[in-house]
Amino acid sequence: KQEVTQIPAALSVPEGENLVLNCSFTDSAIYNLQWFRQDPGKGLTSLLLIQSSQREQTSGRLNASLDKSSGRSTLYIAASQPGDSATYLCAVSDDKIIFGKGTRLHILP
Amino acid sequence: SAVISQKPSRDICQRGTSLTIQCQVDSQVTMMFWYRQQPGQSLTLIATANQGSEATYESGFVIDKFPISRPNLTFSTLTVSNMSPEDSSIYLCSAGRQETQYFGPGTRLLVL
């Protein structure tokens, strides 16, 4: 049974710092991995999708990597801003989408 | 891509009542799904909404509690029946293919 774990559960960093969010999954037979952002009381916004054949994807200040063999992904956020404060969810897709519990990120002004 | 809208965006309901959540997609999609996110928890798939037939429910979810309709390729409803405070959650609709889904804004439900 696929399980997705995100570490840390919560993170506070000063504005301007670079940071890394971690995601691990137990079964490497996935179609893709997605990183989502969820603002309080809102739905999900897809940030980056990495296909199983890819190793990374970049969008602006965000870079996501995927290492299927080790069952790990990281989301790197460069030059963090207060507007980056949100919960970040990792999800893997095999025959369904399985989500982690998320990392609550707070950027301190 | 697809744009998903949900109604209502939030509601406060009394114990024992039922609430129907609507999900509209701006284009025809193969699959539609309903998720629940309980406070502090990850998203959990409730069911796959099948067009013209009964929904496919995940373990732990039953049709009597969460009846789902999908009359066409762009619209689905989820009803949360006989609600209790434990049903307080965000309910999200998604659409697309199984491996690539687009999510609606969610419906925040509080049951008193």
Image (cartoon, coloured by chain):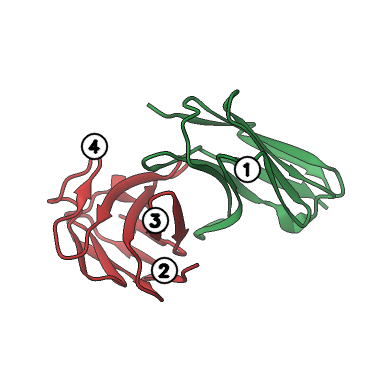
Chain colours: A green, B red
Residue at disc 1, secondary structure: strand
Horizontal and vertical percent position of residue A41? 51, 58
Q: Chain of mark 3?
A: B
Amino acid type for the residue under numbered disc 2 = Ser
Q: Chain of mark 2?
A: B
**Decide: marks 1, 4 in contact (CB < 8 A)?**
no
The lab-note entry on whether marks 1 and 4 share a chain reads no
The residue singled out by tag 1 in the image is: A104
Whichever of callouts 4 and 2 sits on the residue coming sooner in the sequence is 2
The mark closer to the camera, 1 or 3, is: 3
Tell me if A32 is positioned left or right of B73 in this view.
right
In the rendered structure, find residue B97 and report the number of the disc placed on it: 3
Give me the C-alpha separation between circle 3 and circle 4.
21 Å
In the image, what residue occupies the spot 60% across and 23% down? A70
The mark closer to the camera, 3 or 4, is: 3
The mark closer to the camera, 4 or 2, is: 4
Horizontal and vertical percent position of residue A21? 68, 37
In the image, what residue occupies the spot 22% across and 55% down? B15
Asked whether residue A39 is in view, the answer is no
Asked whether residue B50 is in view, the answer is yes
The residue singled out by tag 2 in the image is: B9
Tell me if A67 is positioned left or right of B57 in this view.
right
Amino acid type for the residue under numbered disc 4 = Ser
Give me the C-alpha separation between circle 1 and circle 3.
28 Å
The residue singled out by tag 4 in the image is: B59
